[in-house]
Image (cartoon, rainbow, N blue to C red):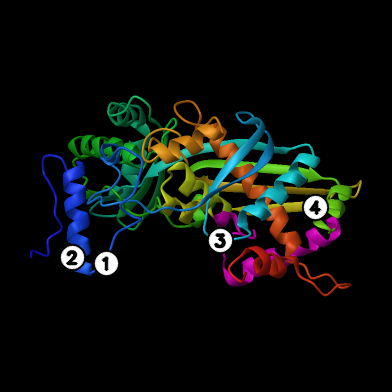
Amino acid sequence: MTSKIPRNKENDFSSDIIAERQHFLEQKCDVSLNHTRQFSFDPESMDGNCEHLFGVAQVPIGVAGPLLVNGEHAQGEFYVPMATIEGTLIASYNRGMRVIRESGGVTTTIMSESMQRAPMFMFKDARDTRDFCQWLKDNFDNIKAQAESTTSVGKLLEIEQYPVHNMVYTRFDYSTGDAAGQNMTGRATFVACEWIRANYPKLRTYGLSGGLDTEKKTSFVNSLKGRGRKVTAEITVPKEVLQDVLRTTPKQLQNGNSINTLAAYMSGASNNAAHPANGLAAMYLATGQDIANIGEANQCSVYSYVTNSGDYYYSITLPALIMATYGGGTGLSTQRECLELMGCYGKGKAFKLLEIAAATVVAGELSLVSAARTDKKTGKNEWVDAHETLGRNR
């Protein structure tokens, strides 16, 4: 039997070709595919999302909430679907959401947006490089027109310039509507670069991706300039709520944040938070996002202090939060239902989803940081006990 995976050039998502691949794998790998082969969605809907389709990965989805958000786009209470295999995670976020409700909600703000493609342009020498930087500024409107001719949604906002030696690293920054926008910006930037090549004779060559967009990894440039959307979520938690729900105090939480910040500095970590990737990954899986974007979205900074009245102010800024409500995997049946639970499916809903996601991160941070503390009187640690009861150590 051939070792080549079966496929059909005419229709690679029909029931027949999927069954052929399932049979192929069972024969080749000597396994029985009882669960991965069962799914409820139309396989044709996977065209453009997955190649060599033979089944699905079933991940448990739980719900936390209600989450009270005081956003500009997300306002009111939301039930947040979270796909995870980590016991205690949803319970912890649910507890944090109770803290948020009893504190009057978390305030969320979209600070900026900018999805990048980052071409690199190469010249004979540094003087040609310098002159090209000025030419880019002078011809921005022409370049913008070329880029935007490829999309009805994307808008070129800025071309960042980082000249070095005989090269110019750039970042073409776009707004992308309700899409995440990586593919959109790729095509738009390619067309713009081809126009630049045709109109700037001193250009030796260019690379469509010079790497400075730092896609799917953390970076200093993204922490400052942002990628996707930069979102801030902030809340003031009354000291009584901390004591009643989390059994801690503003002073203890502030001390914990100072310790985490020092540890982040010493270790070279990309953030001084506890675990934003946990909640974001669970939401990404549930709502059809590109899960690899967690590499960027996890990057953040936490700022907090004890107020004059003795309450606890907490703020987190996520500079590279990449989420969509339209396109990609968001239209798949399971993922669409999860978006619909929050009223976030389709056009005009991306900012709403981003605000809910940032607020969810706050819930998880408040809960985990409080649980990690050991009670001097009882000698117990909530984080350890919760994992013993609900998690992998059950």
First in sequence: mark 4 vs mark 2: 2
| The quadrant where residue 109 appears | top right
Residue 74 is marked as: none
Relative to 341, is 336 on the left or the right? left
* Spatial CA span between label 1 and label 4: 56 Å
First in sequence: mark 3 vs mark 1: 1
Q: Amino acid at mark 3?
A: Glu
Residue 158 visible in this rendered orientation of the protein? no
* Spatial CA span between label 2 and label 3: 33 Å
Viewer-nearest residue: 91 or 76: 91
Q: Amino acid at mark 4?
A: Tyr
* Spatial CA span between label 4 and label 3: 31 Å
* Spatial CA span between label 4 and label 2: 61 Å
For the C terminus, the image quarter is bottom right
* Spatial CA span between label 2 and label 1: 7 Å
Contact check, label 4 and label 3, Cβ < 8 Å: no
Disc 2 target residue: 27
Nearer the camera: disc 4 or disc 2: 2
Contact check, label 4 and label 2, Cβ < 8 Å: no
* Secondary structure found at label 3: loop
First in sequence: mark 4 vs mark 3: 3
Contact check, label 2 and label 3, Cβ < 8 Å: no
Q: Amino acid at mark 2?
A: Gln
* Secondary structure found at label 1: loop
Nearer the camera: disc 1 or disc 4: 1
Residue 86 is marked as: 3
Disc 1 target residue: 31
Disc 4 target residue: 305
x and y, in percent, of residue 382 in the image: 75, 66
x and y, in percent, of residue 325 in the image: 45, 34
Relative to 380, is 84 on the left or the right? left
